[in-house]
Amino acid sequence: MSYDLKAIIAADAVADELLPRLGPSVVVRLGQGLSLIPPSDGWRGEARMGQSARAFPEFENLTVEVAEIIRQASVGAAIAYVEGESFGNVGGQTAAVWRDGELVLPPHQVIPVVWTPEGGPIDEALRLLGVVRLPERDEFDSVGLGRFRHTEQWRVVPALMDRLPAMELAWHRPRASDPNYYATTVSDQHFSLVRGRGDDTAGLTLGLIGGTESRTFDALPATWHLATGPALDSSLPTSQPVVGGGLVQRLARRLRGRR
């Protein structure tokens, strides 16, 4: 299973102040008083245009302009920029931390990551931001960086989950013996199958397939419709769904036609 993360991490108040200077993105609260800002399409695209747009060769998505914004905002604070990717058991991490306008952790890259008791570069950066390990967890998991598996999900899923109760969604249970209902929503090119558990009227818990985001509802929102029967699409499995671009897009078109 793959994982990718590219983000700025800072104290809640610092992140709130940074956001207006970074273009269209969002602030997502983590644990221990920290927040995460995923990159906007703008500065991600600029970094992809060529090596000259990058602040450091170790980072794929950090532009010179954004690095300077981080440096200026770090006066009186500590701010980290991190990138991490993995597929299966192979991955890499890069992290840097600014404090008082200086790099206190120059870009530290480890490829492939060799897991040690001290963790990887992202754990090192989080320690400099004051993160304390929880029992049986490293710094990465202690602040909830495993909440989503892809950077784009940090940008869209929290707001999407807030909007779901007001959206008209057709939730589908492929067969009566399957306890789950499935519906699909789409943002940009991503994802997503959102899964509901519970009976037809109450106690529904929504979870993002492939992630840990979940919400619980005491009653079925009025705009949601639950059905059991033939799949909306012949490629929809009758048990555990498989996330794939073609399936997501086909289901999304069908759902949009029902609204």
Image (cartoon, rainbow, N blue to C red):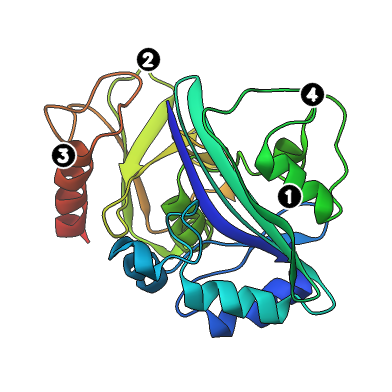
Tag 1, which secondary structure?
Answer: helix
Where disc 3 sits, the SS reads helix
| Residue at numbered disc 2 | 177
Q: x, y percentage for residue 215?
A: 59, 47
Q: Which residue carries the number 1 mark?
A: 125
Q: Residue at x 71, y 37 (%)?
A: 141
Identity, as a three-letter code, of the amino acid under mark 3? Gly
Instruction: Pick whichever of labels 1 and 4 is earlier in the sequence.
Output: 4
- The reply to whether the C-beta atoms of the residues labelled 2 and 1 are less than 8 Å apart is no
**Mark 2 → mark 3, Cα distance in angstroms:** 26 Å
For label 3, the crowd category at 10 Å Cα-Cα, with few meaning under 14, some 14 to 19 and many 20 or more, is: few
Please give the label number shown on residue 175.
none
Q: Quadrant of residue 187?
A: bottom left
Q: Disc 4 or 3, which lies upstream in sequence? A: 4
Q: Which residue is mark 4?
A: 117
Question: How far across and down, in percent of the image, does residue 46 sit?
Answer: 34, 70
Camera-side mark, 4 or 3: 4
Residue at 30 percent across and 54 percent down: it is 186
What residue sits 67% from the left and 41% below the top? 121
Q: CA distance from mark 4 to mark 3?
A: 41 Å
Q: Nearer the viewer, mark 3 or mark 1?
A: 1
Judge whether 234 appears above or below 219 on screen.
above
Judged left or right of residue 138, residue 193 is left
- Mark 3–mark 1 distance (CA, rounded to whole Å): 38 Å
Residue type at mark 1 is: Ala
* Residue 246 image label: 3
Which numbered disc, 2 or 1, marks the residue that appears first in the sequence?
A: 1
Counting residues from the N terminus, which is met first, the one under dot 3 or under dot 1? 1
**Residue 239 in the image: above or below residue 210:** above
